Image: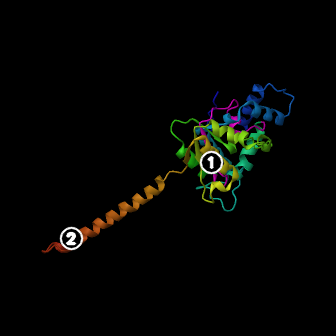
């Protein structure tokens, strides 16, 4: 079943219920450690199903904002909270890892959907962007008709030894999910090219080899367009007023001066 969390859902309650669901669905012994159960779940659910929905990302945005307000996430000195938000690295260390630890060490994606979801969209990014920058670009550029997405920071179990899943690039969770996806969405950042990260370069190569549609994510330009329109309207108004004043300046007769004065009021 698909879990659509609401705004009022607490992190702790969500984590506990998801952890309980994960344990109940696992045939492993209840006496196994949380780590054993988490590994078992990630090996039982195919890697290409470690996915989230569009609405999960909206929920993640709200969770990060609340974590910032409560002080759970601390900004670094060079991070702009309102525009870009904390970096993916900061969100992973201060939000994703603590929350998924409470949920039994599974990934954020399997915490939300213990049985996994079919993969429609593969998201490639370099972790250097702010989380709000990332979420704005992904949600604005989300291809029409696609329902789910695989994103490494949410798909991979951040509290487990991820290298144990990476014995071969071709059989890694990245490669398995990308092959299963319909579209790859690349999320650029303001720092440097995503292809300075080896995995991003490999993902681009594999997407090309598999004939995947590759899209570049970007955020909405509506705020900039609205600001430009305001200046255009103001300039048009000033220009019209100056044109009218210039015309009236040439009006003769005894009332010309009075009309000009009224036009400038």
For residue 258, say whether it is visible: yes
**Residue 135 at x, y = what percent?**
59, 47
Identify the secondary structure beneath mark 1: helix
Q: Which span of residues is magenta-colored?
A: 104-130
Q: Is residue 224 above or below residue 168?
A: below
Of residue 187 and residue 7, the one placed in the foreground of this image is 187
Q: How many residues crowd mark 1 within 10 Å: few (<14), some (14–19), many (20+)?
A: some
> Which residue lies at the image location 61% right of the left edge and 55% below the top edge?
189
Q: Image point 81% across, 32% down: which residue?
A: 37
Position of the C terminus by quadrant:
bottom left
Magenta stretch: helix, strand or loop mostly:
loop
Q: Which mark is in front, 2 or 1?
A: 1
Relative vertical location of residue 51 with respect to residue 259 in this rendering, above or below: above
Residue topped by disc 1? 204
- Is residue 163 depicted above or below 239 in this figure? above
Which residue was labeled with disc 2? 247
């Amino acid at each position: 079943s698909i879990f659509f969390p609401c705004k009022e859902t607490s992190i702790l309650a969500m984590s506990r219920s998801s952890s309980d669901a994960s344990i109940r669905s696992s045939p492993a012994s209840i006496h196994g450690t949380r780590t054993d159960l988490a590994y078992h779940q990630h090996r039982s659910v195919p890697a290409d199903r470690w996915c989230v929905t569009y609405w999960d990302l909206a929920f993640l945005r709200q969770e990060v904002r609340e974590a910032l307000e409560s002080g759970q996430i601390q900004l670094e000195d060079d991070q702009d909270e309102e525009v870009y938000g904390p970096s993916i690295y900061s969100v992973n260390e201060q939000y994703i890892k603590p929350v998924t630890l409470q949920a039994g060490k599974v990934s954020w994606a399997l915490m939300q959907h213990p049985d996994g979801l079919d993969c429609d969209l593969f998201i490639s990014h370099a972790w250097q962007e702010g989380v709000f920058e990332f979420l704005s670009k992904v949600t604005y550029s989300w291809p029409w008709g696609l329902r789910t997405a695989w994103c490494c920071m949410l798909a991979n179990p951040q509290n487990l030894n991820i290298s144990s899943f990476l014995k071969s690039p071709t059989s890694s969770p990245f490669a398995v999910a990308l092959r299963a996806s319909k579209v790859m969405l690349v999320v650029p950042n303001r720092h440097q090219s995503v292809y300075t990260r080896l995995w991003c370069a490999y993902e681009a190569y594999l997407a090309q080899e598999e004939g995947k549609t590759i899209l570049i994510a970007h955020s909405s330009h509506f705020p900039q367009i609205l600001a430009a329109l305001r200046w255009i309207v103001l300039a048009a108004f000033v220009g019209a007023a100056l044109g009218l004043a210039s015309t009236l300046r040439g009006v003769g007769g005894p009332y010309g001066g009075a009309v000009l004065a009224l036009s400038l009021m």
